Each structure stands twice: as C-alpha cells, then as structure tokens.
Image (tube, rainbow, N blue to C red):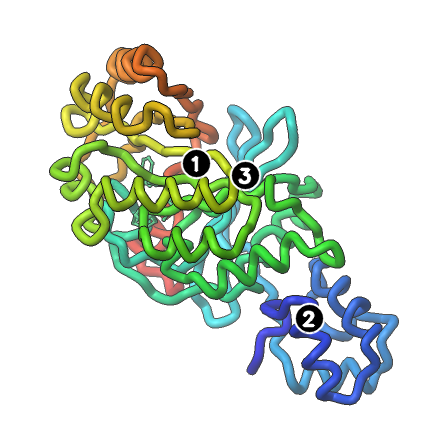
Amino acid sequence: MTEIKAFTIEELRGALAAMGEKPFRAGQIFKWLHLPVASFDEMTDLSKDLRAQLAGQFLLTVPRVERKQVSAVDGTMKYLWQLHDGDCVESVLMRYRHGNTACVSTQVGCRMGCAFCASGVSGLKRNLSAGEILDQILFMQADSGLPVSNIVLMGSGEPLDNYENVVNFIRIVSCPEGICIGQRHISLSTSGIADRIEALAGERFQLTLSISLHAPDDESRSAMMPVNRSYPVARLLRACEYYFDQTGRRVSYEYAMARGVSDRPWQAEKLARLLRGRPSHVNLIPLNPVKESCLLPSTRESVWRFQQILEQGGVTATVRRRLGPDIDAACGQLRRRRLKEGESL
Ligand code: SAH
Ligand code: SF4
C-alpha cells in the first residue's frame, strides 16, 4: 500500500485528482498528515466516505514508542520507535537555549560499516520512507510537548544511501503547508558518498552539509570508514567544494577523535592544511565508546591540543559537548541493545 505521508503536496494533489477530488482537499489532508493522527477517522473535516476511501488506498504510518529515556543531566530524550512492520529506529530530542533539535534516523541499520559505530554493526535492514523520517519528528513533538525547530539527519543510517526518500523528506518538512522547518535549520550528515553530495548540490537546498571526516589521511580514514576506499579524502573534499560553489553554504566537518588513531598532532596539522581557505567549520568530539568496537576516545588534553593546532592553522574548530551522557547516547546504541536482548524488532 502507498504511504500517504511520503507524498509531497504536489504528489498528494495528483493522487487526489486521480480519485476525482477537488484540489483544495490536498491542503486540508496535508495539514492533517502533519499532526500526530492515528487514523484517517480523526480527520474530522473530511466526509466519512472520503476517509474510508483514503484508508482503503493509503497506509497511514503511526510509530509506537517502544522505549524512551530522559537524561537527568540535560533533559535530552531518546526514543526507540516501533514501525508498522515491527522494525525499530531511534531518534533523539536535544534541548538547547535556542530551541529543540530533533536527531532522526534515515535507515534501519546502515551498510557503511564504520568501525566506531553501533548502527552499522548488523548492516542495513531497510530504508525509511520520507513519511517514516517525518513521523519521528511529529511523534516526538506530540509525546514531549516540545516544538522542534531544528533537524539533524544524524541518527542511524546513511542519508545519501537513501537519497530519493531523504530528498523528498526535506521537501516535505520544509513545505509551507506542512510543519515548515526552514532548510537552514536542517543539517544532513554523511560519511562521504562524493557523487551523491554532488547530486545533492544540484537540488539547491539551503541545508547544512555535515561531513563525518574523522581522519585527514587515507590510511587512517579507510581503517575507520570503508567508504573512504571508494571516495578518498581528496575526492570527498572536491565534492564539498562543489557543494559550496553551488549552494553558498559553508560545509561543516565532524571529527570523532579516536585515541592514537586520529588524534595525533600531525593529523591536526594535515587537517588544517586541507581545510585552510575553505569556508568550513570543524566539530571535535571525543569518540563515544561502543561495545562492538575497540576504538577508544581521545583524552581531553589531546582534544584541546588538536583544536589549538587547527586554530593556529587558520581553521575554526569547536569542541562539542556530549548531550545525554547518562543515556545510550551514541547513534545506534539503543536499537543495538534491544537486538542483543533478542526481543523481536
Ligand atoms: N551516516 C551518517 C549520519 C549518521 S551518524 C554519517 O555517518 O555521517 C551521525 C554522526 O555520529 C556521524 O558523524 C558519525 O560519524 C557519528 N558517530 C557514529 N558513531 C559514533 C561514535 N561511537 N562516537 C562518536 N561519533 C559517532
Ligand atoms: Fe552508517 Fe554513519 Fe554509522 Fe558510518 S557512522 S556506520 S555511515 S550511521
């Protein structure tokens, strides 16, 4: 059955026209689809007949809260959702002074196989639809009572490995007739599929592209991230330059620091040389230890030293605070734990 929340408003108009409905119905239904309704019967300003027709033709996805954790330290909320087919994904709601940020998943699992990441351990189960990505935001807002003003595509999954659905999600979530979150308030994080970055540049979205770089040299990066064997650092940075040229948006680089692997001073110097003169920003974060990996977080001292070298080299870098340190914070950890407990997901 076709998922109705995966439609952009134009696609919904087309689908309704095919059913013989008037164009204004699309706006009316689109509004309902952006509220956390559990069935077409809740769409009370539609005729009973139309509601029944919609229910017969379209699937209305409604995720169920499978597990929820709230950080006692900073109020970060982590949700594990059960989807309509029993699969599970997680999302996080982070509370900042300037608003609430939703971190959402784009796939069930991930096939990129990064050595430090819990999401990739059991590979890719399936892609999420645009509607299932949107649902995480709608239902976190409903459950928490907190409005979401920013979105980061940094949950489980590689967004650019689910390109069509993610691009549709961005169109839907930033659409004025829906929840209308401005594209400048959306960040897409990628492990670096260079040709998809170039395709994304062509969409001319105003979102922030965030590259999970984690190492500046091919040897260390390939050891941490297999994707680097297909798209080495120089190729990736060329794609980032193209992205900036096409969109005018500064690219940001995530750098999870692994002790003795990616935190050495020469690597900071190399990174500074690579990024100097490019409109960019580096976020440093000590690697979050996950059980499945033998990589360890860098010490605070080496993070600071790394930052200093970058700044001296003319590259701006921030050391990121870890949110929700008392809950399973790293991406993929909550689902991973449930998988291990052997409960049906
Ligand atoms: N697949 C995309 C987006 C999801 S991962 C990507 O890789 O960019 C979101 C971010 O969390 C990425 O920057 C990823 O590298 C980082 N990450 C994953 N596991 C981590 C860990 N154990 N410690 C620190 N960062 C981690
Ligand atoms: Fe996938 Fe991102 Fe995890 Fe790598 S870091 S395995 S790309 S989710």
Q: Amino acid at mark 2?
A: Glu
The one of 9 and 335 positioned closer to us in this rendering: 9
* Image height of 75 relative to 62, above or below: above
* Local crowd size for mark 3, using a 10 Å CA cut-off: few (<14), some (14–19), many (≥20): many
**What residue sits right under mark 2 in the picture?**
10
> Can you tell which mark lies on residue 77?
3
Q: Position of residue 149 (x, y in %)?
A: 65, 40
Question: For the point 55% across and 50% down, which residue is it?
Answer: 205
- Callout 2: CB less than 8 Å from ligand 1: no
Q: Amino acid at mark 1?
A: Val
Q: Position of residue 102 (x, y in %)?
A: 56, 43
The one of 32 and 16 positioned closer to us in this rendering: 16
Sequence-wise first label, 2 or 3: 2
Report if the CB atoms under discs 2 and 3 are less than 8 Å apart: no
* Local crowd size for mark 2, using a 10 Å CA cut-off: few (<14), some (14–19), many (≥20): few
**What residue sits right under mark 1 in the picture?**
251
Q: Position of residue 120 (x, y in %)?
A: 28, 52
- Looking at the image, can residue 28 be seen? yes
The quadrant of the picture occupied by the C terminus is: bottom left
Sequence-wise first label, 2 or 1: 2
Q: Amino acid at mark 3?
A: Met
Q: CA distance from mark 2 to mark 3?
A: 34 Å
Left or right: 280 in relation to 111: right
* Local crowd size for mark 1, using a 10 Å CA cut-off: few (<14), some (14–19), many (≥20): some
Residue 316, quarter of picture: top left
